[in-house]
Amino acid sequence: MPHVVTGRCVDCKYTDCCAVCPVDCFYEVEEPAMLVIDPDACIDCQLCVPECPIHAIYEDEEVPECYKEWIEKNAELVAVGTQISEKKDALPGAKTLEEIQEYEKQQGWDVDEPRGA
């Protein structure tokens, strides 16, 4: 059961998660500007989940309905990404968890936070 980076990461790219991954399964993608997880490399250790300041990482079986498309997108985008294992600055204008939650609320989405976040 690999983990998935959801759309919450788009235009943010907080990389705290990359620095703790023991198998270097994170990839940086430029379009959309975000991180993704290689589902074939992820060992489901869950170390990344509490590190993400915007709670963008979920176990694939627990991804909220509004973000389900990101399960497949992670697998696809790994091929065009660059492996990343070090923390660096987030993108300028990266949203906070509160801003993301407010956006989700405005969309009418009821999003549970990831287990372990």
Image (tube, rainbow, N blue to C red):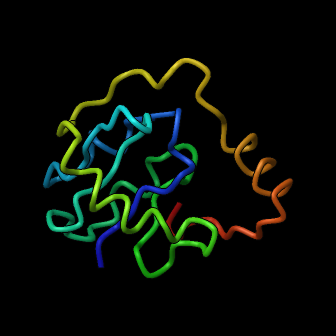
Q: Which residue is drawn at 42% across and 56% down?
A: 5
Query: Total of numbered circles in the picture?
Result: 0
Give residue 81's position: percent from left, percent from top: 23, 40
Residue 32 shown left or right of residue 88 in the figure: right
Residue furthest top as drawn? 92
Give residue 49's position: percent from left, percent from top: 43, 58
Please say if 61 is above or below 108.
below
Q: Residue at x 34, y 23 (%)?
A: 88
Please say if 38 is above or below 72.
above
- Which of these two is toward me, 104 or 50? 104
Please say if 81 is above or below 23.
above
Please say if 22 is above or below 40.
above
Give residue 60's position: percent from left, percent from top: 40, 75
Q: Which residue is drawn at 16% across and 48% down?
A: 24
Where residue 48 sits, quadrant-wise, is bottom left
Q: Quadrant of the N terminus?
A: bottom left
Q: Which residue is drawn at 67% across and 70% down?
A: 112
Residue 109 shown left or right of residue 22 in the figure: right
Give residue 37's position: percent from left, percent from top: 29, 55
Residue 61 shown left or right of residue 100 in the figure: left
